[in-house]
Image (cartoon, rainbow, N blue to C red):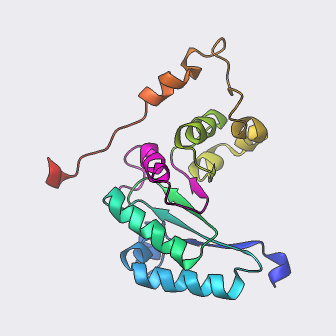
Amino acid sequence: MLPDISGVDVNMGCPKSFSVSGGMGSALMKTPEKAYEIMRALVEKFGDKISVSCKIRVLRTDQETFRYIKLMQKAGVHWISIHPRTAAEETRVPARWYTIKKLLETGEISIPVLGSGDLFSPRDVHKYLSYTSAHGCILARGAIHNPGIFKLKQAMLDLATPLISAKDDQSADEDDWKESIVEPVMDEEQN
């Protein structure tokens, strides 16, 4: 079976009740040691043959998220995808790209980091990669709503070249979109 498989990605980000009620998806983020054991076992069994990765969501604090990422890194995953909303938030709040940026700026994450969240157009992907310095991204709703998004794949990934010239779109300036990044939502306890 391995010749037909290029990787195993464990989705620890799914917030849906059918997944969580069975101890899967984002429920694995509540049991970090169990998640570590699963990922370590997959890496030990398949890691020299195929890619082993996981998708997570952010936790309540950046510190908790950072510890979780470090644990997955210790398990030996080859890369990790981070969705910058908590499981409880689902898509009710804007994705917090700045969280991924801050995590990467620590310099302590040695595996490639991909991100997701509010990536609906090639321009969103280009902005996300430029802003966060992530190694890549994964698309969910953006690809479902617009499968044609992949037609501009090379343009999305070429960060040296603006995707849309300032002449064609005044909001293409880097400062314009950085200002539109949403800042943290305060927890009720912090208000």
Q: Position of residue 71 (x, y in %)?
A: 46, 74
Residue under the point 53% across and 71% down: 73
Residue 89 vs residue 11: left or right? left
The image quadrant that residue 180 belongs to is top left
Residue in the image at 34% along x and 38% along y: 183
Magenta span contains residue 95: yes
Where residue 121 appears, as percent x and y from the top left, is 63, 37
Tell me which secondary structure the magenta stretch mostly adopts.
Answer: loop
Residue 10 visible? The answer is yes
Quadrant location of residue 59? bottom left
| Image-based side of 40 in relation to 190, left or right | right
In the image, which residues are magenta? 88-117
Please report the residue visible at 60 percent of the width from the left and 42 percent of the height from the top: 129
> How far across and down, in percent of the image, does residue 143 sit?
65, 48
Q: Residue at x 61, y 59 (%)?
A: 112
Image quadrant in which the N terminus is located: bottom right
